[in-house]
Amino acid sequence: MSTATGETARRSEAFPKRILISLGLAAAVMMLAAVPRPAGAGDVARGARVYKTTCIACHGAKGDGVVPGTPDFTDPKGPLAQDDAVLFDHIKNGFQSPGSMMAMPPKGGNPSLSDDDIRAVIAYLRATFGRAEEK
């Protein structure tokens, strides 16, 4: 085998490895983007603004629910006992609590809420009504 042919063979073997490494790095970045981020003070302040303009009508200023069947955020066994991923899903996609006569609409009825707004609301809920740390 000539030196040129051997070099071509090594390059062709290395090419798939580079692709696999690149795909692996891309997958890792995507996975990290999906991991809940710890809340910062700005997130809590943003969450407070969103809560006071979207959520307060049903959940109340004290988080104990003003509409019958609305979950009580102050209950240690209530919604804040769940993982952030579950809370995020319920807020984003809507949810009907067991025993409630009506469901919370997706995004609390505010279609302009972004995923970051929802994460900020969760940070606010945890800081204000429940555990500050995430599961």
Image: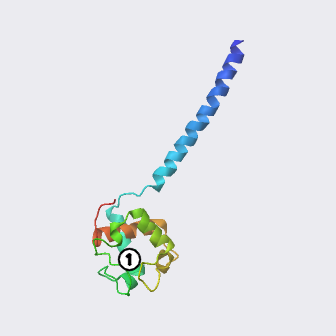
Give how far across and how far down residue 10 sits, in percent.
64, 22
In this view, the residue farthest toward the top is 2
* Quarter of the image with the C terminus in it: bottom left
Please determine whether, in this image, residue 32 is positioned above or below residue 125: above
Number of marks drawn: 1
- Position of residue 29 relative to residue 86, above or below, is above
Q: Quadrant of the N terminus?
A: top right
The residue that appears at 32% across and 75% down in the rendered structure is 73
Could you tell me if residue 44 is visible in this image? no
- Name the spot of residue 27 as percent of width and height, x first: 53, 46
In this orientation, which residue lies closer to the viewer: 7 or 97? Answer: 97
Residue in view at x 33 percent, y 73 percent: 78
Residue at 27% of width from left, 71% of height from top? 76
Is the residue 38 above or below the residue 81 in the image?
above
Q: Nearer the viewer, residue 4 or 77?
A: 77
- Residue on which the image places disc 1: 51
Q: Position of residue 13 (x, y in %)?
A: 64, 27
Q: Quadrant of residue 86?
A: bottom left
Left or right of 73 in this view: 94: right
Q: Nearer the viewer, residue 32 or 50?
A: 32
Horizontal placement of 25 versus 133: left or right? right
**Which image quadrant for residue 97?**
bottom left
Q: Residues within 10 Å of mark 1 (few under 14, many from 20)?
A: many
Q: For this view, does 123 lie left or right of residue 6?
A: left
